[in-house]
């Protein structure tokens, strides 16, 4: 009987939820069992959820983005090798973001634009070239509107919409108010991505909990993830509320000590 079979028998006896995530990845690598993969998906589904929210109001429904991101999570699980020493969240994030961006590229327009505006935008671009040749000058909005027999507002709307079909490169440079040094678009837009902090925090919590006993893990899950009171947790564990309170303080101190060790590195 090989090691893969031994591991399969082990997780059939023991609840999947009680198996360490690293061991689950090793088991899945050997067995490709769909139940193991489903458990890994459930544990890390928070990653595509967080990343999908970054693309809300970008012209595509959140549910569609989340489905694409979830597929990216599955691709990451299939490719991940726990023995290489990387944290899964760090490995999965670029894979998921890549799938989301590819989905947006496949949609053509960076923002979903009504078809009537897309069609008018194409006409406006064609007419601009034609009128410039005929008038021997850059046509005005009024000229284009009269030629197409539409309102000036419709022309302006189509011209604005055409800007989202081909987004500007982040490497485009701008004059820095007369200074010698130019600035690039990527230097003046955007902000720190707080979602990566969430991933790091989750990894930190998960790594700390590997050193906790079963009761401590249960208290962390019920108190800080399931929002249960100390009284409810005490009743569930069959101990006093004071015992839960003391254990909770002990757990917090363990987290604090591990955090201090991390900062000393």
Image (cartoon, rainbow, N blue to C red):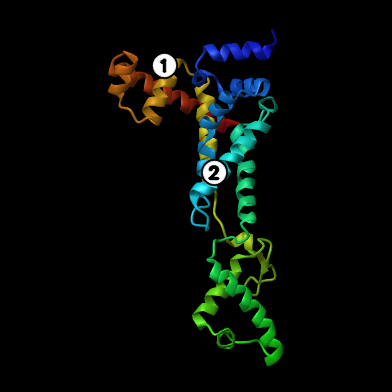
Residue 147 versus residue 184: which sits nearer the camera? 147
Which mark, by number, is residue 259?
none
Residue under numbered circle 2: 67
Question: Is residue 33 placed above or below 186 in the rendered structure?
Answer: above
- State the residue at coordinates (63%, 73%): 122
Give the crowd class for mark 1: few <14, some 14-19, many >=20 residues within 10 Å.
Answer: few
Give the crowd class for mark 2: few <14, some 14-19, many >=20 residues within 10 Å.
Answer: some
Residue under numbered circle 1: 215
Residue 201 versus residue 36: which sits nearer the camera? 36
- State the residue at coordinates (63%, 10%): 6
**x, y percentage for residue 219?**
39, 22
Callout 1 secondary element: helix
Q: Residue furthest top?
A: 1
Query: Where does the N terminus fall, quadrant-wise?
Result: top right
**x, y percentage for residue 116?**
54, 70
Question: Is residue 227 placed above or below 117 in the rendered structure?
Answer: above
Question: Is residue 179 placed above or below 35 in the rendered structure?
Answer: below
Q: Is tag 1's residue or tag 2's residue first in the polypeptide sequence?
A: 2
Q: Is residue 80 left or right of residue 204?
A: right
Numbered disc in front, either 1 or 2: 2
Query: Where does the C terminus fall, quadrant-wise?
Result: top right
Q: Is residue 145 left or right of residue 247?
A: right
**x, y percentage for residue 15?**
50, 17
- State the residue at coordinates (50%, 83%): 151
């Amino acid at each position: 009987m090989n090691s893969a079979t031994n591991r399969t028998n082990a997780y059939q006896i023991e609840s999947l939820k009680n198996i360490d995530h690293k061991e689950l990845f090793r088991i899945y690598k050997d067995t490709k069992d769909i139940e193991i993969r489903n458990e890994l998906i459930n544990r890390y589904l928070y990653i595509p959820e967080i990343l999908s929210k970054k693309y809300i109001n970008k012209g595509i429904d959140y549910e569609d983005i989340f489905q694409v991101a979830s597929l990216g999570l599955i691709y990451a699980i299939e490719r991940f090798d726990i023995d290489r020493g990387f944290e899964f969240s760090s490995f999965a994030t670029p894979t998921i973001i890549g799938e989301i961006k590819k989905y947006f590229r496949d949609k053509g327009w960076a923002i979903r634009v009504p078809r009537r505006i897309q069609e008018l935008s194409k006409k406006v671009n064609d007419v601009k070239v034609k009128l410039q040749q005929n008038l021997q000058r850059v046509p005005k909005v009024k000229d284009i509107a009269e030629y197409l027999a539409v309102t000036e507002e419709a022309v302006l709307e189509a011209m604005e919409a055409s800007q989202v079909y081909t987004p500007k490169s982040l490497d485009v440079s701008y004059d820095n108010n007369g200074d010698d040094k130019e600035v690039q678009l990527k230097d003046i837009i955007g902000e720190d991505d707080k979602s990566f902090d969430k991933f790091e925090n989750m990894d930190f919590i998960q790594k700390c909990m590997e050193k906790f006993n079963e009761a401590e893990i249960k208290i962390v899950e019920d108190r800080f993830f399931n929002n249960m009171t100390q009284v409810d947790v005490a009743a569930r564990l069959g101990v006093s509320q004071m015992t839960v309170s003391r254990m909770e303080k002990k757990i917090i101190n363990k987290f604090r000590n591990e955090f201090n060790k991390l900062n000393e590195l």
